[in-house]
Each structure stands twice: as structure tokens, then as C-alpha cells.
Amino acid sequence: MAGSLLLVGCGKMGSAMLAGWLAAAIVDRVVVVDPSGAPGAPQHPAVAVVPAIDAVPADFTADVVVLAVKPQVMDGVLAGCAGLVHPGTVFLSVAAGKTLAYFARHLGDGAAVVRAMPNTPAAIGRGMTVAVANPLVPDERKSFCDALLRAVGQVAWIADEALMDAVTAVSGSGPAYVFLLAEVLAAAGRDAGLPADLAVQLARATVAGAGELLHQSDTPAGQLREAVTSPGGTTQAALSVLMAEDGMQPLLTAAVAAAAKRSRELAG
């Protein structure tokens, strides 16, 4: 499976996805639209970079137009995309909050659109993406979009678009929560008397190692936690704080709710 792509926006997410597509050899030709010159784009004979949508070669018709820009600038980007709506062309958006109805308003009711929410581990091929398609996306194009997204990690498709705000809050924003865990664990280590550099080393290695163990194991997270917890031991003492009524669960529940609320506000 291979096709031609127009990639609008080549920041961290766009460049990571492009690298994955090229490595998987699932694109024949890619035109990248990026006013900065796409410094993060891999050098490849199949890739051409132009500064604006109106500079896309006249003979180029994309099978998929990937919209990898921030939601705050999407209105301006779509203003130049009306001429890109062709039979068989699918618009694949990775912008948080922007709904299928939003794209229909800007591109027309005849536009085939896939809305996807990847996360930053896509940069190392370990992303998690959830996607939803409108009824105009044909099966073969949906399969192609699945291959594009799967090139940078796992993919799950949903039928109920209303779930996307919660998806954004859990997996889209989720890596930041994990990075914060590493930060605060290191800070706690310093407060406990560890040298700063050792506290950072221990926190980073512990978070990364535990994540990899979870990735490689089919055991539920709760069972892995219990396996580390000896009755009356040090881990249980710490978990009695983290699992208290005012501990980690209500804090994360509130955080995810706040992120989901903001995702709805960005819908436009």
C-alpha cells in the first residue's frame, strides 16, 4: 500500500510521522507545506517542501491531506484548502479538539475526513493514536490512513466521535503527566536527601523502566503494582498516601476532566 500525501505542518508531530511513513515505505510522494522550510523533515527524494498551500505543484493530487498544525491556526490553514477537495482525497487531521463537523463547515459537506489524536511517543514509533472517520471515507482510504498512523505506533478506531475529548485528555495529553511524574519523583528524592543528579537519574530510569515493563507485559497494571507491594513494607507505606481518598486517583480524574473540557472548547 502506497500513495501520495500532502503534509500541512512539519513540526515535531508532522516530522515524526513523515519519518515513520518513509521508513515503512508507504508513501510514493510527499509534498510538505511549511512556511519555516520544514527543518525537521527527513531528506528524501520522495519529499518536496513548499512554503504555502498555493505553492503546491499544479500536477499534484494527494490521496491524503494530513493536517498537522495546532488547532489555534487551523481556520487559516483550511481557508486555503478548498481547492484540495477532490473525489478520493481524504483529509486526516491530528489537531486536538477539531471535530468532523468543524471540517465539514470549512471544507464542505462532501469532504472525506478522518480525525485522529496521536501522542508524542510517535516520535520514537511508540505512539498511541485514536481515530474516527466520517461516512464519506471509503474503506480503502481508511485502511491507508490506518497504515499512516500505525507507522508511528498503535492505532484504535472508534465510531463515537464524542469519545475523542476523553481520548485527548488521557492519551493525547497523557505523556505530559508521565513526564511530570518523573519531575516530581526526582524532587521528592532531593527532599529525601539524595544528590540532585542521582535523584533525576533514579526517577527517569524508574519511570522509563516501569513503563517498558508495563509495555512488555500482558499483566494488568494493578497486578504489577501488587507484585511490587509487600505487606507492611516501604511501598505499601507510600501507596497508602498515593491511594488515599485525596490521593492520585481524584487528582488525575480532575486533571483529565480539565483537559477534556479544554478539548471541547477548542472544537470551534
Image: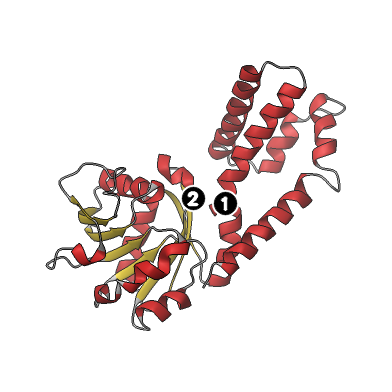
| Residue situated furthest bottom in the rendering | 109
Mark closest to the chain's N terminus, 1 or 2: 2
28 to 192, vertically: above or below: below
In front of the other: 45 or 206: 45
Residue at 57% across / 59% down in the picture? 167
Could you say which disc has been placed on residue 118 in the image? Answer: none
Circle 2 crowding by C-alpha within 10 Å: few under 14, some 14–19, many from 20: many
Q: Amino acid at mark 2?
A: Asn
Q: Look at the numbered discs 1 and 2 and tell me whether their residues touch, using CB distance below 8 Å.
A: yes
**Relative to 51, 199 lies left or right:** right
In front of the other: 212 or 109: 109
**SS at circle 2:** loop
Among the 4 quarters of the image, the one containing residue 191: top right
Residue at 40% across / 58% down in the picture? 69
**Relative to 159, 194 lies left or right:** right
The residue wearing badge 2 is 119
The residue wearing badge 1 is 173
Q: Position of residue 153 (x, y in %)?
A: 43, 47
Q: Quadrant of the N terminus?
A: bottom left
Residue at 30% across / 71% down in the picture? 80
Q: Amino acid at mark 1?
A: Ser
Cα gap from disc 1 to disc 2, whole angstroms: 7 Å
Say whether residue 160 is visible: no
**Relative to 209, 2 lies left or right:** left
Q: Position of residue 255 (x, y in %)?
A: 69, 53
Residue at 69% across / 34% down in the picture? 184
Q: Position of residue 169 (x, y in %)?
A: 60, 57
Among the 4 quarters of the image, the one containing residue 266: bottom right
